Image: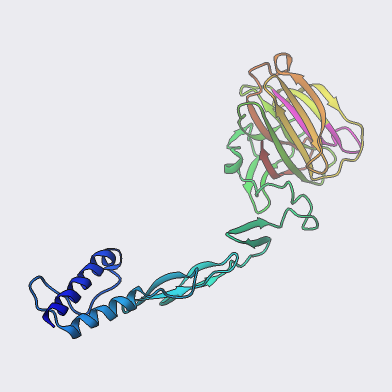
Amino acid sequence: MKGFRLLAYATFIGLLSGMFSAVHAACPLPYQMSNGQVPDASQMMANFNALAACLTPGGSTNSIQYNAGSGAFGGVGPLTDGQMVIGSAAGAPQAQTLTPGSGISITNAPGAITIASTLGTGGSGLYRQVLSATPTTSSTGLGTWLNQGSCSTTDSTVGVSITAPSSATNNICGRYRAAPSPPYKITVLLGMTRNNSASMLGIGWYDGTSKLQLLSYENNAAPSTVLRVRQFSSPTSANTVNFLSNQIFFSQPIWFQLQDDGANVYFAFSQDGVNFMTLYSVAKSSGYLGSGGYSNIILWANPFTSSSELATLLSWTQT
């Protein structure tokens, strides 16, 4: 009997050395054996039973195991396509799928979850496919005033707005930022709020000193709206017109785009935000602002009348 006990004890120690190192923290034994102690059969069996219970997998094949307490394992699953293990306060973790919110779709597949926006799909709103996040003065980088005067700017729920007070002549005010390194495209959606017969808004380039070359949406000196590319020697002095469209009653909001490919600059517009028509282009080396003058992008307004104007930037993307 004594030999049997020694053999059993040796077997027990062998099992522990092979398995207990990986699970010792999660598998406490009711009795601790020390070197030189005469083993007791009931204590050994209790330790064996505790170890066997602890090492018994929780759940079925492909389940995820967790500590169920009292030295036992529990199991979650097996998980179906797209399921995840999600914590539950003061309770066992649960197998759940993600729930999509408004404008979000979730597709579950074996070993994969795909989350996508549905706002850009057909029928979910005009311009949703190309509209940026709501622009702000911070996100666009349009942080510096040119000829501010009594103009003011506001970040609102629809974008960046510039309020320009009345003016009897050309009096551009705007916010500008350093242009990106070419090549690049700046694409914007602009809206104008006004009750006057002559006003302008748009985007363009500013040389950082005085001169500007600007793309505008306006009805200045015309019974209908026109698009114009014009040179300004200063914010209050206009000169050469590079391009003037026909009187087509262009609707708004309207998409404008500036492009610099490194050698040339382009002024373009679109009514759908995807298909753009170039109105005017010129080599930078021979352009009005010179090869190094196309250095700042400006969002601007020019009331040019006895009534104030509100110009709003509704979308801003840079590619």
Instruction: Locate residue 256: give its quadrant.
Output: top right
Residue 21: percent from the left, percent from the top? 26, 63
289 to the left or right of 4: right
259 to the left or right of 84: right
Residue 270: percent from the left, percent from the top? 81, 39
The C terminus is located in which quarter? top right
Above or below: residue 284 compared with residue 177? above
Above or below: residue 84 compared with residue 54? above
Residue 90: percent from the left, percent from the top? 40, 77
Residue 238: percent from the left, percent from the top? 76, 24
The N terminus is located in which quarter? bottom left
Is residue 256 in view? yes
Give the residue at x 67% y 48%: 159
Is residue 169 in view? no
297 to the left or right of 244: left
Q: Which residues are magenta?
A: 212-227
Q: Is residue 215 magenta?
A: yes
Outermost residue, top side: 286
Q: According to the image, what is the colour scheme of the structure?
A: rainbow
Q: Nearer the viewer, residue 254 or 162?
A: 254
Instruction: Locate residue 50: give its quadrant.
Output: bottom left
Above or below: residue 256 compared with residue 160? above
306 to the left or right of 206: right
Q: Is residue 109 magenta?
A: no
Give the residue at x 68% y 42%: 316
Instruction: Locate residue 191: give its quadrant.
Output: top right
Outermost residue, left side: 36
